[in-house]
Image (cartoon, rainbow, N blue to C red):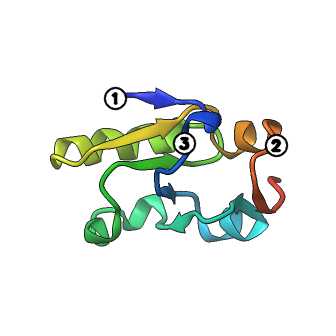
Amino acid sequence: MRDINPSEVQDRPIVDVREPDEWEAGHADGAIHIPMSEIVARLDEVPDGAAVICRSGARSASVVAYLEQQGREAVNVAGGTLQWATEGRPMVGSVV
């Protein structure tokens, strides 16, 4: 599994795997919301090469490991939305 910093996301599609209340509070601008609990059922909606993000990077790392087991290419955003916001990356709302 490969980790990248928020500044390395660049043109990759972003998949946010947090719960709906976390998503509503604030998320990376342009991200797709697919909660971790729905990844298996919605696997076809996950773009290949996605940068997967959660609050701190732990849940997204688990999702990336699962995606790789399914033969999908994905990377984990180290530090999650907390690091994303700290780096001043574009947000919708704010991180709680």
Question: Considering only order in the chain, which callout, 3 or 1, is on the residue closer to the N terminus?
Answer: 1
Q: CA distance from mark 1 to mark 3?
A: 15 Å
Which amino acid lies under the numbered mark 2 shown in the image of this protein? Gly
Disc 1 secondary structure class: loop
Q: Give the numbered dot on residue 1.
A: 1
Q: Is residue 68 left or right of residue 56?
A: left
Q: CA distance from mark 2 to mark 1?
A: 25 Å
Task: Identify the residue shown where x is 27% and y is 48%.
Answer: 67
**Residue behind mark 3:** 9
Q: Position of residue 28 (x, y in %)?
A: 67, 57
Q: Residues within 10 Å of mark 2 (few under 14, many from 20)?
A: few
Q: Give the numbered dot on residue 32.
A: none
- Residue 2 quadrant: top left
Task: Identify the residue shown where x is 63% and y is 38%.
Answer: 6
Q: Are marks 2 and 3 in contact (CB under 8 Å)?
A: no
Which amino acid lies under the numbered mark 1 shown in the image of this protein? Met
Q: Position of residue 19 (x, y in %)?
A: 59, 64
Residue sitting at the far front = 11
Task: Identify the residue shown where x is 47% and y is 48%.
Answer: 52
Q: Position of residue 3 (x, y in %)?
A: 47, 28
Task: Identify the residue shown where x is 33% and y is 71%.
Answer: 45
**Residue behind mark 2:** 88
Disc 2 secondary structure class: loop
Which amino acid lies under the numbered mark 3 shown in the image of this protein? Val
